[in-house]
């Protein structure tokens, strides 16, 4: 009989939830008292939209970064003239929908508790779940894993999550009963970290799992607990997270008992506050990869990926051009030394540079210097990290600066060695030219 370890090694096992302080919450928000099973909240890096009333066409409140705006939807103007496609294969109310990564498939759950995978352009049903042991309520595509995650109830009315193969919906790959509560479970999946968050309506806790392509597929990590039950919840896109504090996910809980919106950050504990490359892979940006007409014509393309490294998208608008052509004596430097120079630059994480440094016009260099100064406020680079607010943050920043100074000293030493090698090469070239 083989022995299986009880715990699975994971770098996300110790993720913990951190609620925002009172001054960072949004107070006195008139959250709807409707009992519909919905998020009632949507979030992006600039706005938080909250449903305030569902009856009579509905109304919602949009909270921007520094302003409050109320939008009235009771208008005779048609915002959407007509749909480009109507899918009428469902016989009852649709409870949930989810597109896959490239937009070629659409998964739905209906009031008949079945899961269907559709071709959204043709409107045809490609797969349909006929499994009776799981009555699905919400469904979600899991990134590029070719799997579906559904939440619902079992035959004994226990709240349950199930994992499906998108090519075979006959039997789920795995099922897990959670509890006997009656609130709907909302799944949220982070495609960058392969973490699944399960939020129950009326619950105060948030469960999170790690999803893998191999068995057992779902590995329970832990849960964030709170005494305040959530009416609905919204999620901040990855491009709006605080990477300096190792934040990998952020929820916005709607707490009706206090008329409060409470941000809850999921943080990976790390000693260093520098950018952590392993937990921030390239993620989906705000730029669309296809136009609506291209998608309607049948084109499939994944999202445009961006890096979350602060300032990574900032490029110099001025091209580097040579001021004068290279001299023949300098152009004859040996290829071996040129390769060493490029290798040193790559190891340092910089762009491989030419051994003969490119000359830039003075006006371009001055413009770049002024542009760089505009990024710095009170000695801090606003794209890297905000200024420290506490003594602990100041101490951690001091340690980071010490590490940066040590790295720069090593780089200077390497450049000095390289300069000496260059002097020897030039000396050898002169001696060789004098012989001839």
Image (cartoon, grey):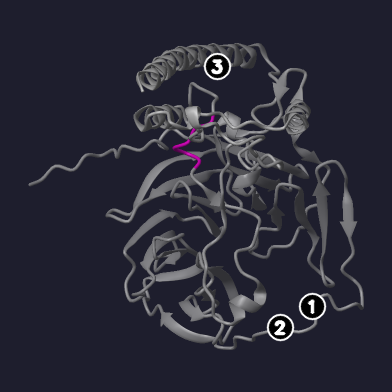
**Vertical side of 324 occupied by 87: above or below:** below
Q: Does residue 41 appear in the picture of this structure?
A: yes
Q: How many marks?
A: 3
Residue 61 image-quadrant placement:
bottom right
Contact between labelled residues 3 and 1, with CB atoms less than 8 Å apart: no
Looking at the image, which residue sits at the far left? Answer: 1
CA distance for labels 2 and 1: 8 Å
Q: Residue at x 75, y 28 (%)?
A: 362
Asked whether residue 279 is drawn in magenta, I would say yes
Q: How far apart are the two marked residues, 3 and 2, measured between alpha carbons?
A: 54 Å
- Which residue is the site of mark 2? 83
Within-10-Å neighbours for mark 1: few <14, some 14–19, many 20+: few
Dot 3 falls on a residue whose secondary structure is: helix
**Left or right of residue 430, residue 79 in this image:** right
How far apart are the two marked residues, 1 and 3, measured between alpha carbons? 52 Å
Q: Is residue 119 above or below residue 37?
A: below
Residue 300: image location, x then y, percent = 52, 72
Indicate the secondary structure of the residue bearing disc 1.
loop
The one nearer the camera, 229 or 340, is: 340
Which residue is located at x 38 percent, y 16 percent?
Answer: 431
The residue sitting at 80% across, 82% down in the picture is 81
Q: Which residue is mark 1?
A: 80
């Amino acid at each position: 009989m083989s022995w299986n370890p009880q715990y699975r090694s994971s770098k996300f096992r110790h993720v913990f939830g951190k609620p925002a302080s009172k001054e960072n919450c949004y107070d006195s928000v008139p959250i709807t008292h409707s009992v519909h099973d919905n998020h009632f909240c949507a979030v992006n890096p600039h706005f938080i939209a909250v449903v305030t009333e569902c009856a009579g066409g509905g109304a919602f409140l949009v909270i921007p970064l520094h302003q409050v705006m109320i939008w009235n939807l009771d208008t005779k103007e048609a915002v959407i003239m007509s749909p480009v496609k109507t899918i009428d294969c469902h016989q009852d109310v649709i409870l949930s929908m989810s597109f896959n990564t490239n937009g070629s498939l659409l998964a739905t759950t209906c009031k008949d508790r079945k899961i269907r995978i559709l071709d959204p352009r043709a409107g045809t049903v490609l797969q349909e779940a006929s499994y009776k042991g799981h009555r699905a309520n919400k469904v979600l595509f899991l990134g590029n894993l070719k799997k579906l995650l559904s939440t619902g109830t079992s035959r004994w009315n226990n709240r349950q999550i199930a994992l499906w193969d998108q090519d075979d919906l006959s039997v789920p790959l795995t099922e897990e009963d959670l509890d006997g509560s009656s609130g709907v479970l909302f799944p949220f999946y982070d495609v960058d970290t392969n973490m699944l968050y399960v939020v129950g309506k009326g619950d105060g806790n948030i469960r999170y799992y790690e999803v893998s392509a191999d068995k057992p597929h779902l590995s329970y990590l832990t849960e964030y607990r709170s005494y305040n039950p959530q009416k609905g919840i919204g999620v901040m896109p990855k491009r709006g997270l605080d990477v300096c504090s190792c934040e990998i996910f952020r929820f916005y809980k709607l707490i009706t008992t206090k008329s409060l919106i409470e941000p809850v950050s999921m943080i990976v504990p790390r000693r260093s506050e520098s950018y952590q490359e392993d937990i921030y892979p390239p993620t989906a940006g705000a730029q669309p990869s296809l136009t609506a007409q291209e998608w309607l014509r049948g084109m499939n393309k994944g999202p445009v990926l961006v890096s979350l490294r602060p300032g990574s998208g900032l490029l110099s608008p001025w091209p580097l051009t040579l001021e004068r052509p290279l001299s023949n004596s300098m152009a004859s430097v040996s290829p071996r030394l040129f390769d060493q120079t490029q290798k040193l630059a790559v190891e340092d994480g910089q762009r491989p540079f030419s051994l003969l440094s490119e000359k830039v016009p003075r006006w371009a260099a001055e413009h770049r210097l002024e542009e760089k100064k505009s990024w710095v406020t009170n000695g801090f680079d606003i794209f890297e990290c905000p200024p420290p607010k506490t003594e602990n943050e100041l101490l951690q920043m001091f340690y980071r600066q010490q590490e940066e100074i040590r790295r720069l000293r090593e780089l200077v030493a390497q450049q000095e060695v390289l300069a000496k090698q260059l002097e020897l090469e030039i000396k050898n070239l002169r001696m060789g030219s004098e012989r001839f």
